[in-house]
Structures are given as C-alpha cells and as structure tokens.
Image (spheres, grey):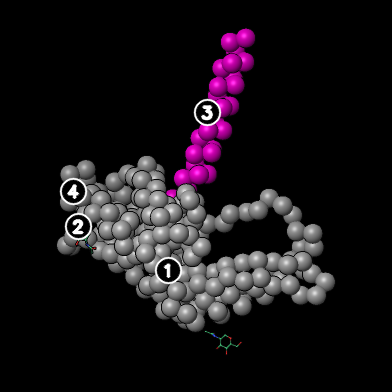
C-alpha cells in the first residue's frame, strides 16, 4: 500500500536524520554574530580549520589564530586522549564540516564531534585562550540505570575528585581511572582539559 510505504519512508528519514546527527556531533553557536559571505573572516576561518587539522593530531591538542583584526579568528581543537592521531584528524575535520552545516556564517561556535572518537572544536572572533568555558556543556547519558543509585553517585563523585586532582597535575591535563569501594560496583572515568588552561583552572572546572 502506497500510504504505508510513504509512512515507512518518512520514519526511515527521521531515523537517518537522527543517526546522522548522533554520528556527526552537536554544535552551539546560539550567541554568535554572523559575518557577510564576502567577509575576509570566512577565508580566515577556513585557514584556521586547515591549521587545526594539521596541528592537532600529533599531540591531540591544537591552538591557532588567523588574520588581523577585525577579521581575526581564534580557535582550538582537542581530541580525547585515547585517540590515534589519524582518528583525531578525521574527528577535527568532521567537526569543522559540522560547524559549517549547523553554524554557517557564524563568527563563533563550539562543536562536540564523536566521529572516530571524541573531539571538540571551538572558534571565535574574541580571544578566549586560557579562559575557563562555563557556558557550554554537553551530557551524553548512558540509558542503563545504576543498580544502587546512591552508592553509584558516591563512587562517581569520588572518582571524579581523584581524576580532576590527577589530571590538573600533568601537562596533558588528562587522567583516567577506576574506583571500587568494597561492596559497591566499579566505576570508570576520565577527565581531560584543553591545554590552554592552567592546571588549577582545569581542576576547578572539573569540580564545578
Ligand atoms: C596555517 O596554514 C597556512 C597554510 O594553510 C600556513 O601558511 C600558516 O602558516 C599556518 N598558520 C599557523 C598559525 O599554523
Ligand atoms: C550555548 O551557548 C549559549 C550562549 O553562550 C549558552 O548560554 C548555552 O548554555 C549553550 N548551550 C549549551 C548546551 O552548551
Ligand atoms: C592532589 O591531592 C593531593 C593529596 O592527595 C594533594 O597533596 C595535592 O595538592 C592535590 N593536587 C592538586 C593539584 O590539587
């Protein structure tokens, strides 16, 4: 029946759209001004993307600025510490392309991409290096329920305290670990900050 075929197609498109969004990531440019299509800012942004996609993979962190005021653009990219440099490059490039899909002609944006791992790309016309970002936040939720929610919360906050302390003390601003208190379930975690931050700011932010 043609009607159900149409319904099916519609459902399939919805599912596909959902999968595509899930695979490509999430962006936020809600507070950003736009630039005009022929503004030098656009070309500077493209050069920034190219710089970050070569600069980020070797150390999993990159930071660059392109152009002169008023068209200067600042940006950074961070890949999760468990990623290979080639997956990091793919992820950063994907984040750049996602930013152009979701935030075309926006002067500033942040993208969380989970393409080949997890990475963050952020750019702005206002210099933000070394500043703690308290505006942007993303939460990925595991749909499973913890067996003992109270104990799980205690375990998790204990682990995060430990990881934020450890990660703030090393230049990579990264720590991963697990914690099991007798009788409770084991929890695993990781903490990582962008390397433009001071260790103390990193720890403070992780504990927020
Ligand atoms: C950015 O890349 C361009 C070539 O695409 C290069 O000329 C420039 O030096 C790079 N700038 C930085 C800051 O890496
Ligand atoms: C998106 O950006 C706006 C403006 O900076 C901020 O208020 C909001 O909390 C951000 N949303 C997320 C999900 O990070
Ligand atoms: C981490 O914890 C230790 C004690 O366990 C403390 O001596 C140290 O100052 C802490 N590091 C930071 C950066 O807070």
Quick one: label 4 or label 1, which is nearer the N terminus?
A: 4
On screen, 106 above or below 5? below
In contact (CB < 8 Å): disc 2 and disc 4: yes
On screen, 111 above or below 162? above
Secondary structure at badge 4 equals loop
Q: Position of residue 201 (x, y in %)?
A: 46, 77
Distance from label 3 to label 4 (Cα)?
36 Å
Circle nearer the viewer, 4 or 1: 1
Q: In the depicted view, which residue is nearer to us: 12 or 201?
A: 12
- Magenta-drawn segment: 1-27
Give the residue at mark 4. 39
Distance from label 2 to label 3 (Cα)?
39 Å
Q: Report the side of 150 relative to 137 (left or right).
A: right
Quick one: label 2 or label 4, which is nearer the N terminus?
A: 4
Secondary structure at badge 2 equals loop
The image's mark for residue 13 is 3
Q: Position of residue 106 (x, y in %)?
A: 31, 49
Distance from label 1 to label 3 (Cα)?
36 Å
- Asked if residue 114 shows in the view, the reply is yes
The image's mark for residue 194 is 1
Q: Is the CB–ligand 1 distance for label 4 below 8 Å?
A: no
Distance from label 2 to label 4 (Cα)?
8 Å
Q: Position of residue 163 (x, y in %)?
A: 58, 75
On screen, 138 above or below 161? above
């Amino acid at each position: 029946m043609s009607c159900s075929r149409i319904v099916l197609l519609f459902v399939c498109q919805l599912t596909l759209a959902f999968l595509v969004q899930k695979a490509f990531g999430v962006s936020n440019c809600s507070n950003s001004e736009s630039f005009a299509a022929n503004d030098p800012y656009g070309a500077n942004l493209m050069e920034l993307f190219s710089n970050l996609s070569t600069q980020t993979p070797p150390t999993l962190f990159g930071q660059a600025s392109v152009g002169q005021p008023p068209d200067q653009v600042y940006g950074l990219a961070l890949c999760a510490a468990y990623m290979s440099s080639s997956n990091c490059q793919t992820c950063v490039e994907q984040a750049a392309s996602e930013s152009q899909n979701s935030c075309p002609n926006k002067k500033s944006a942040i993208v969380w991409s989970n393409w080949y791992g997890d990475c963050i790309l952020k750019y702005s016309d206002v210099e933000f290096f070394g500043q703690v970002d308290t505006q942007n936040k993303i939460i990925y939720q595991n749909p499973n329920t913890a067996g003992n929610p109270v104990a799980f919360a205690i375990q998790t906050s204990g682990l995060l305290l430990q990881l934020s302390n450890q990660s703030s003390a090393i230049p990579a601003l990264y720590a991963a670990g697990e914690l099991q208190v007798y009788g409770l379930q084991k929890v695993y975690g990781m903490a990582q900050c962008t390397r433009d931050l001071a260790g103390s700011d990193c720890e403070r932010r992780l504990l927020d």
